[in-house]
Image (tube, rainbow, N blue to C red):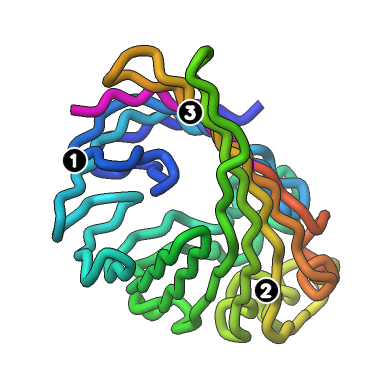
Amino acid sequence: MKPIKFLFPLALILNTDLILANSERSIGILVNESSSIYLDTNKDTVFAPFLSYDSDTFFIKQRSIGYHLTNYLDASIAYKDNFFDPDDSTNADMQLLDRRKGGVYVKGSLRASIFNATIEQDISGRHDGYSIQAGVHLPLYSALEAPLIVRGSIDYIYMDEQMSEYLYSVSASESARTSGRIANFSIKDTTAIKYGLRTISPITNNLNIVTILNYVRYSDEVNSSPIVSKNYNYSGTILANYTF
């Protein structure tokens, strides 16, 4: 079993869903487990403290630093971890492939009622591609007697050809390293659908327990890659969050 990773506050796994409305400062601790679509690659488990700050103009969220341009529009710069590390695979041929590294992205995010949209552009030179995510985030349940908030979401994700190639293609040199056992492969732009469910359970006025479940279904083009073993992945997060 893959060991649990421990991360420090300046390299936090944060999701904007984890930040409750009207909170300027938030500290807590979370556990996240996520599966991988890559061939013979183990699930990833992360144990991480986190710290966030959100004012009327400036914010720090999800390894990102940004600015509220309006009440509905944000601009930020964010860092993403590796998408695929060959050392995480138990397959000897997969271990010979190049690492699909993370990098720095510039992001624009729009929120309008239940509608959300985000565009990300790589500016670190990893692949120079971009992705777009757009969807609806809906309140499903709220009870004052037994404090509980449940929210659901569905998002459409588009990745351009450059980003898709970086994540799912196999270069001729990579294929040669495996003596052709992993074939050379190219791919065009790809899509996915992401389903999310989030619950917020207030323990006190400041302390909340948050759970987030995500399921992503990828297009057939992704599943046709020889380094991909399934067309879906999932992640689950449990967060103890204190706001002040």
Q: Height in image: 128 above or below 4?
A: below
Q: CA distance from mark 3 to mark 1?
A: 18 Å
Q: Height in image: 138 above or below 117?
A: above
**Is residue 44 something one can see in this rendering?**
no
> Is residue 240 located in the magenta-colored stretch of the structure?
yes
Q: Secondary structure at mark 3?
A: strand
Q: Is residue 231 left or right of residue 235?
A: right
The amino acid marked with disc number 3 is Ile
Residue 108 image offset from top left, x and y in percent: 36, 73
> Is residue 47 located in the magenta-colored stretch of the structure?
no
Between 160 and 55, the residue placed more toward the observer is: 55
* For marks 3 and 1 on the same chain, the one whose residue lies earlier in the sequence: 1
Q: Marks 3 and 1: CB-CB under 8 Å?
A: no
Q: Height in image: 141 above or below 13?
A: above
- Between disc 2 and disc 3, the foreground one is 3
Quadrant occupied by the C terminus: top left
Instruction: Report which residue position mark 3 lands on.
Output: 200
Q: Secondary structure at mark 1?
A: loop
Residue 61 image offset from top left, x and y in percent: 30, 50
The amino acid marked with disc number 2 is Glu
Residue 38 image offset from top left, x and y in percent: 72, 55
Q: Residues within 10 Å of mark 1 (few under 14, many from 20)?
A: some
* For marks 2 and 3 on the same chain, the one whose residue lies earlier in the sequence: 2
Q: CA distance from mark 2 to mark 3?
A: 45 Å
Between 24 and 77, the residue placed more toward the observer is: 24
Residue 134 image offset from top left, x and y in percent: 56, 69
Residue interval drawn in magenta: 235-244
The amino acid marked with disc number 1 is Glu
